[in-house]
Image: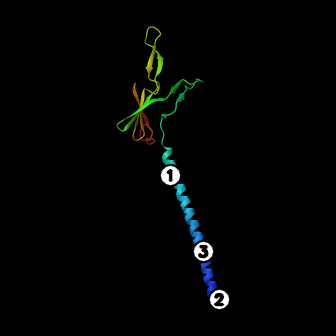
Amino acid sequence: MADIEIVHRKSYIVHRKSYIVHRKSYIVHRTSYILLVLFFSLNAATAQSWSPINRYEKMNFSQVPLNYISNTVWVDSARVSGSDSVFYFNRIVTNCDTCLATYRLCNQPGFLKKNMYKRSGGTYEFRYPGSVVIKTLASPGRQKPWR
């Protein structure tokens, strides 16, 4: 009888160790699953951080039929105005089309205006001369993403 009890006790210990090993394996798998879900959810949250202008890079644009760069835009300076960020773009020299003689006009805005206001809620406003608004977080079909 004592032999049977020792065998059952050893069997219980073996099963208990097996249970502990499986439990640890389950915890490792569950933890890795949670970390994986957390990683992808944080990655998806930052994937929507879109901006029309990158402050630290020069952007080159070309018109469709041309094979060369027709416009270059970069942020010349920036400041904070209340809760908005204001980015000032580089200026260009253009031909004077209203002058009688051939003159050049300096310190003129490029095709993206003189500055850009970055507002909360994903709203970007390009100003001077005129105003163009881009709403990056606008719902599809609900409102125009620009004004």
Q: Amino acid at mark 2?
A: Asp
| Mark 1 vs mark 2: in front | 2
Where 67 sits versus 31, above or below?
above
- Residue at the (62%, 77%) spot, across then down: 14
Question: What is the CA distance from the residue labelled 1 to the residue labelled 2?
Answer: 56 Å
**Discs 1, 2 touching: Cβ within 8 Å:** no
**Discs 3, 1 touching: Cβ within 8 Å:** no
Quadrant of res 80: top left
Residue 89's disc is: none
Q: Earlier in the sequence, mark 3 or mark 1?
A: 3
Q: Amino acid at mark 1?
A: Ser
- Residue at the (60%, 74%) spot, across then down: 17
Residue at the outermost bottom position? 1
- Inspect this view and state whether residue 147 appears: no
What residue did someone put label 3 on? 17
User: Taking 18 as reference, is 127 left or right?
Assistant: left
User: Taking 16 as reference, is 50 left or right?
Assistant: left
Q: Amino acid at mark 3?
A: Lys
Neighbour tally class for label 1: few under 14, some 14-19, many 20 plus, Cα within 10 Å: few
Neighbour tally class for label 2: few under 14, some 14-19, many 20 plus, Cα within 10 Å: few
Q: Position of residue 140 (x, y in %)?
A: 46, 42
What residue did someone put label 2 on? 3
What residue did someone put label 1 on? 41
